[in-house]
Image (cartoon, rainbow, N blue to C red):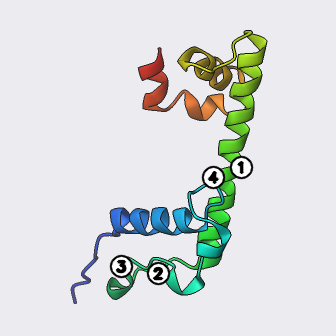
Amino acid sequence: KTIEITPFPLQKVFEQFRLRCQFFSTLGERGADDRDRDTVPDLYSSEGIHIAPSLAIYLTAVLEYVGEYILILVAKASEKQGVEVARAQEVYSALSEDLQIFPLFRRTNLKEQME
């Protein structure tokens, strides 16, 4: 008996997560009134790819927290260097000097591009 293994549809799951996180994000362009539960995007439901709203909300909260944390780091680096508008140098400095963010930042292509 042969077992057929179907590859995991990573790209489709990623797209579904992205849409769901954008829907639940408080940082997006939508107002609170525009978030009707009946309009939650379900791009690949016909293919059996379902992302639970609670999971999308949790991931959105984590991403927004990390984003806010990085914005605070950049603001502090800008203030420390005496500039009013953060540029690439302040962003690089902020991401490089933080002990929690740097291990992730050093493994990204962004670090290489900013150097």
Which badge, 2 or 3, comes first in the chain's sequence?
Answer: 3
**Badge 4 vs badge 1, beta-carbon distance below 8 Å:** yes
Q: Residue at x 59, y 35 (%)?
A: 104
- For label 4, the SS is helix
**Badge 2 vs badge 4, beta-carbon distance below 8 Å:** no
| Mark 1 nearby-residue class (10 Å; few <14, some 14–19, many ≥20) | few
**Residue 34 visible from this viewpoint:** yes
Kindly identify which residue carries mark 4: 63
Kindly identify which residue carries mark 3: 44
Q: Which residue is drawn at 40% across and 64% down?
A: 15
Which badge, 3 or 4, comes first in the chain's sequence?
Answer: 3
Tell me the kind of residue under disc 4. Answer: Leu
Q: Is residue 90 above or below residue 43?
A: above
Residue 50: where, in percent of width, then height? Answer: 46, 81
**Residue 99 visible from this viewpoint:** no
Q: Residue at x 60, y 23 (%)?
A: 91
Q: Distance between the residues labelled 3 and 4?
A: 23 Å
